[in-house]
Image: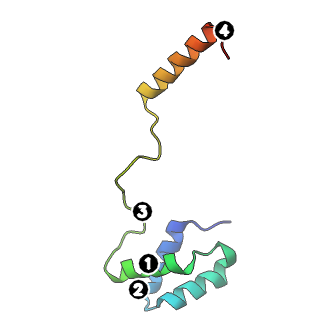
Amino acid sequence: MGVTRVEQRTFIRIAILRGRNVMECHSEFVEALGSNALPYRPVARWVGKFQQGRVSTSDEQRLGRPLSVRTDLARAVIEQLTDEENNDGCY
């Protein structure tokens, strides 16, 4: 059973509230999760964020290209092109 990144961030948040430092958080991760634990640097970054007052464990929305660009229009264009190719005898 894997532990998600959000679950690990939640653990970091709780550990910070309990007064743990970066080394203690990471050591506890490695002890509990072994090779599935977050690396030291991400743990240190999240510890810093929580110490600065961040409360959310979720990723923040970022600018840039979305992960998926599938839209109804794009799907319709692809289907039309596929239908035209199939009707022309092209594969």
The amino acid type of the residue labelled 4 equals Gly
Q: Which residue is mark 2?
A: 17
Q: Nearer the viewer, mark 2 or mark 1?
A: 1
Q: Earlier in the sequence, mark 2 or mark 1?
A: 2
Residue visible at 45% across and 27% down? 74
Question: Does residue 53 appear left or right of residue 84 in this picture?
Answer: left
Q: CA distance from mark 3 to mark 4?
A: 47 Å
Q: Which residue is mark 3?
A: 59
Name the secondary structure under disc 2: helix
The amino acid type of the residue labelled 2 equals Leu
Q: Give the x, y percent position of residue 65.
A: 40, 47
Instruction: From this view, report whether residue 30 is shown above or below residue 65.
Output: below
Q: Residues within 10 Å of mark 1 (few under 14, many from 20)?
A: few
Q: Earlier in the sequence, mark 2 or mark 4?
A: 2
- Label at residue 89: 4
Q: Residues within 10 Å of mark 4 (few under 14, many from 20)?
A: few
